[in-house]
Image (cartoon, rainbow, N blue to C red):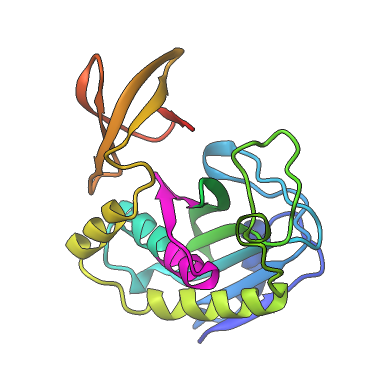
Amino acid sequence: MSQLFYLNECSSTNDEISKFLLYENSDFIGLHTFNQTKGRGQYGNVWTQTAGKNLAYTLAVNTQHILCSDFIFNYYTAIIVRDFLAKLADSDVRIKWPNDIILKGKKIVGILIEKKKINQNNYFIIGTGINILQDKFDEISNAGSLLTQTGVQFDLEEVAFNFHTYLSEKLKNIPSDQEILEVFNKSLFRKNEISVFEIGKQRQNGIIRYADEKGELWIELENDGLRPFYHKEVKLLY
């Protein structure tokens, strides 16, 4: 059963989604708002949105339908979001490891996936913040929106409904781990390009080579050779 709910305002759709999982067969339940006041990003980061300009959306998926590992599931979710945005923007869209979505060099989507037990059922709680109509980002120089990157004024409600439908359907038919890994690596932002990375307090040139099934990113560094990193161990500067 797939349903999409709406709140005029909420602190965090990831936190509020549990109120809508009322039935034993609750599955692919979506919640969205255009005014999220306390959004959260990966690893404790804050995701700030402007009211009435952007979409905060969460999908709850019962884990009994998901046979792949958590890392592979995260990759596949990023792929689905990337594909949806690429079709919407009619442009090449990339995944900045592990799961930020980049359109023409700017981050337009952040994804936060959590696992929660609600009413005796285990769920993946997939939270996404999509910048749609916001045109100013103050000091966040690497952020953008569908509007800033395409010049198109998208309809918020239409994007929310279509996104929920697309995400729900794609998660009902998950491909093999190998296929997911291949597509994820083909979509990686700045793969095989010389970039600057911050490791600890030091900066070093390096080249992203690939992401593996354990959630690690392998970077060929100028001074240290090919090394794997987990998120927060390395920062891509761009």
> In front: 118, or 77?
77
The answer to if 88 sits in the magenta stretch is yes
What is the span of residues highlighted in magenta in the rendered image?
Answer: 80-102
Question: Which residue is at 21% across, 64% downward?
Answer: 179
Vertical relation: 198 (above or below) 95 = above
Residue 125 appears at what percent x and percent y?
52, 61
> In front: 29, or 148?
148
Question: Which residue is at 41% across, 51% downward?
Answer: 95
Q: Is residue 220 toward the left or the right of residue 43 in the image?
A: left
The quarter of the picture where residue 202 lies is top left
Question: Which residue is at 49% across, 33% downward?
Answer: 238
The answer to if 36 sits in the magenta stretch is no
The image shows a total of numbered marks equal to 0
The quarter of the picture where residue 47 lies is top right
Residue 127 appears at what percent x and percent y?
56, 59
Q: Is residue 80 toward the left or the right of residue 117 in the image?
A: left
Q: Looking at the image, can residue 132 be seen?
A: yes
Vertical relation: 54 (above or below) 140 = below
> In front: 67, or 198?
198
